[in-house]
Amino acid sequence: MATRGRPRSFNEDDALDLAMRVFWERGYEAAGVDDLAQAMGISMSSFYSTFGDKEALFLASLKKYETEKRGYASTILERSEPAAVTFQNLFNEAAHQLTRADQPRGCMLTLALHNCSPELEPLRNHLNERRAATVDAFEVRLKAARKSRELDDGTDVRGLACFFANTLQGMSLQARAGATRKDLIKIGRWAMKAWPCRSNGYDH
């Protein structure tokens, strides 16, 4: 009769949360497998049997980050309010989230693989795709604003979406460098100066 394997002595979701914070704070390349296992409080055998390898763990951590730490963006974009108000609220909330004292500063999606070795190019391409999804979401919201006449028909909504996404990435870098929440809120307000027109509910 076959014997059952020993049950895991750790909570997988808690361990993943700890790994996410290591990747978030140190970046992918600087986070060693030994460091990750130690931070998670698990053995190397448990690390590999549960999470596979470092890349698989990183992708799982990234998914957890996007679900639990960046969900505010989707929530704000889906609100029924003038689009300019939506994006100002998004910048304000990002300023809060990027400078929270209970988690690493900045955005993991922006910072975890900012520069990388050539062999990690496929992984960086994956992150670029995730960043592009943010631009796409912004463009959808801006197209709706153009359709509702909040923006002129000739507005380059793709360009504006890219500008706003790049502003958020810059805010992330500034947060990691020590910028205050007040500093980031100012950056967001300056970014909104690029809004093409005065829209209902928003004034520069």
Image (cartoon, grey):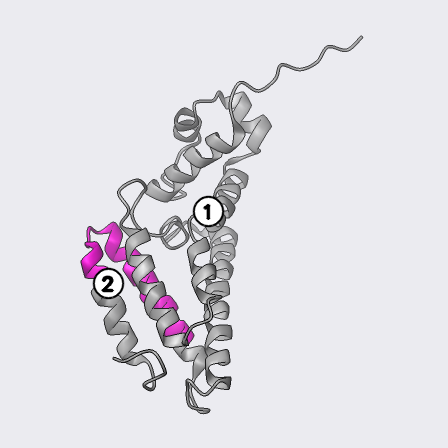
Give the camera-side residue of 149 and 107: 149
> What's the amino acid at mark 1?
Glu
Quadrant, the N terminus: top right
Q: Residue at x 50, y 51 (%)?
A: 123
Q: Residue furthest right?
A: 1
Residue 85 position, x and y percent, is: 35, 72
Residue 27 position, x and y percent, is: 37, 44
Cα–Cα span, label 2 and label 1: 22 Å
- Residue, disc 2: 185
Give the camera-side residue of 114 and 188: 188
Q: Is residue 183 magenta?
A: yes
**Label 2 Cα crowd, 10 Å radius (few <14 / some 14-19 / many 20+):** many
Residue 91 position, x and y percent, is: 32, 64
Q: Which stretch appears magenta?
A: 161-185
Circle 1 SS class: helix
Q: Residue at x 59, y 26 (%)?
A: 49
- Residue, disc 1: 68
Residue 6 position, x and y percent, is: 62, 14
